[in-house]
Amino acid sequence: DAGITQSPRHKVTETGTPVTLRCHQTENHRYMYWYRQDPGHGLRLIHYSYGVKDTDKGEVSDGYSVSRSKTEDFLLTLESATSSQTSVYFCAISATRASTDTQYFGPGTRLTVL
Amino acid sequence: DAKTTQPPSMDCAEGRAANLPCNHSTISGNEYVYWYRQIHSQGPQYIIHGLKNNETNEMASLIITEDRKSSTLILPHATLRDTAVYYCIVRDSPGINTGTASKLTFGTGTRLQVTL
């Protein structure tokens, strides 16, 4: 357990509305990640952060933006939600374990876009 | 990162050892083998990782062949709570402070069903 919480845990919204998902960590980890998981696709990286105000795109970043104004919070925003963004979203952090970095995941947010 | 191949599903009786194989024949010298599992509707859970040597922790053991082309995750006494999808992932580990993102690539994994 790496002290990761995600909020909300479940959300239903309508197409075209903005949505923000929050990832919060309590252990001061530098790296944070947002993934989405869909049937048949496994987990895919959306965006990641390597420090406050330092973020970069992953493989499926279109339609998503992120912000990290403080170490403990990494926000994922869908500016105008679409049905294709219905998914389960996982946040992760990297922590050092046996001299290598290992990712630990949050409990997930299930988002439904109608 | 090297590609991995795992059987899609396996069964195991409760109390017995569960041996989950993984092939990674294209693994390179600086790549680690990581194992995660995902219990239904939960986030992926880290289990264990290794480079060359066999590893053991409180959850499992990881056996890596000498040529590093395959590995086996062993759950010594499987319980019903071990029913999950198990993912074998091969990746390098650039280190926590190198500024390089350590993206994980999850395949389809092995669905382990532990039965009474």
Image (cartoon, coloured by chain):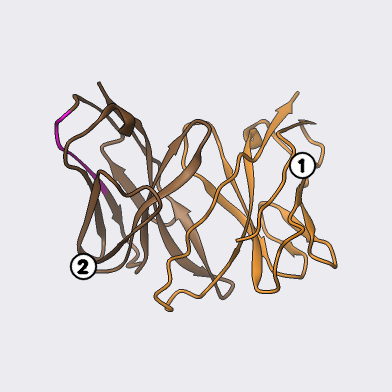
Residue annotated with mark 2: A53
What residue occupies the far front of the structure in this picture?
A62
Image: magenta residue range = A16-22
Q: Quadrant of the C terminus of chain A?
A: top left
- Quadrant of residue B34 within the rendered picture: bottom right
Judging by colour alone, the chain drawn in brown in this rendered image is A
Local crowd at mark 2 within 10 Å, few (<14), some, or many (≥20)? some
Left or right of A53 on screen, residue B76:
right
Name the residue type under label 2: Lys
Judging by colour alone, the chain drawn in orange in this rendered image is B
The foreground one among A87 and B44 is A87
Please name the residue shown 34% across and 69% down the image. Answer: A30
Local crowd at mark 1 within 10 Å, few (<14), some, or many (≥20)? some
The foreground one among B85 and A43 is A43
Q: Position of residue A13 (x, y in %)?
A: 20, 26
CA–CA distance between discs 1 and 2? Answer: 45 Å
| Same subunit, tags 1 and 2 | no
Left or right of B38 on screen, residue B13:
right
Q: Position of residue B84 (x, y in %)?
A: 62, 35
Name the residue type under label 1: His
Classify B24 as above or below B109: below
Q: Position of residue B19 (x, y in %)?
A: 80, 44
Taking the magenta stretch, the answer to whether it contains residue A44 is no
The foreground one among B78 and B3 is B3
Taking the magenta stretch, the answer to whether it contains residue A17 is yes
Tally of numbered discs? 2
Please name the residue shown 18% across and 24% down the image. Answer: A14
Q: Position of residue B55 (x, y in %)?
A: 73, 64
Residue annotated with mark 1: B77
